[in-house]
Image (cartoon, rainbow, N blue to C red):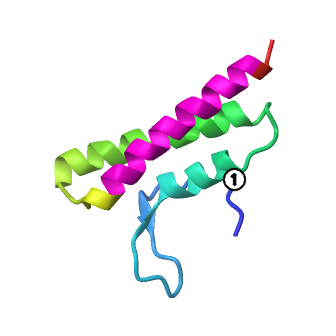
Amino acid sequence: MTYHCWAMSSSLWWYERGASVKQYVWTRLYEAALFEIDDKKLPSCLEATKAAIDRRLTEIQVEHNSSPEELRAITNALRVLQVLRTGLEKRTP
């Protein structure tokens, strides 16, 4: 399944048909950023992913509805986004 950074949902989560685990918008955007090969599109993917993660973190603070696994995944995703951003900055003049 392919996701695009511009295809953001107003919902912070959704259920995939047949899936038993709650999935969040930030995970879809993160996947899209990981596989984006166009350096012109990557900045918007990184921004959209970071914004979705920030919204999810705000939701977690308000509703206290996160698992330790999701928090680890968010931490790891933020590190990878920084690596992608640094790599992009080195490649662009």
Q: Is residue 76 magenta?
A: yes
Q: Give the quarter of the figure containing the C terminus.
A: top right
Residue 57 position within the rendered picture, expressed as x and y whole percent measured from the top left: 31, 44
Q: Residue at x 65, y 45 (%)?
A: 33
In-image side of 59 versus 82 (left or right) = left
Q: Residue at x 58, y 51 (%)?
A: 29
In this rendering, the answer to whether 81 lies above or below 59 is above
Q: Give the quarter of the figure containing the N terminus.
A: bottom right
Residue 34 position within the rendered picture, expressed as x and y whole percent measured from the top left: 65, 47
Residue picked out by circle 1: 4
In-image side of 3 versus 24 (left or right) = right
- Name the residue type under label 1: His
In this rendering, the answer to whether 40 lies above or below 35 is above
Residue 46 position within the rendered picture, expressed as x and y whole percent measured from the top left: 60, 36
In-image side of 68 versus 91 (left or right) = left
In this rendering, the answer to whether 53 lies above or below 47 is below
- Image quadrant in which you'd find residue 84: top right
Residue 82 position within the rendered picture, expressed as x and y whole percent measured from the top left: 54, 30
Secondary structure beneath disc 1? loop
Instruction: Report the magenta stretch's main SS.
Output: helix
Q: Residue at x 53, y 84 (%)?
A: 17
In this rendering, the answer to whether 30 lies above or below 87 is below
- Image quadrant in which you'd find residue 80: top right
Q: Residue at x 17, y 54 (%)?
A: 64
Which span is picked out in magenta? Answer: 70-90
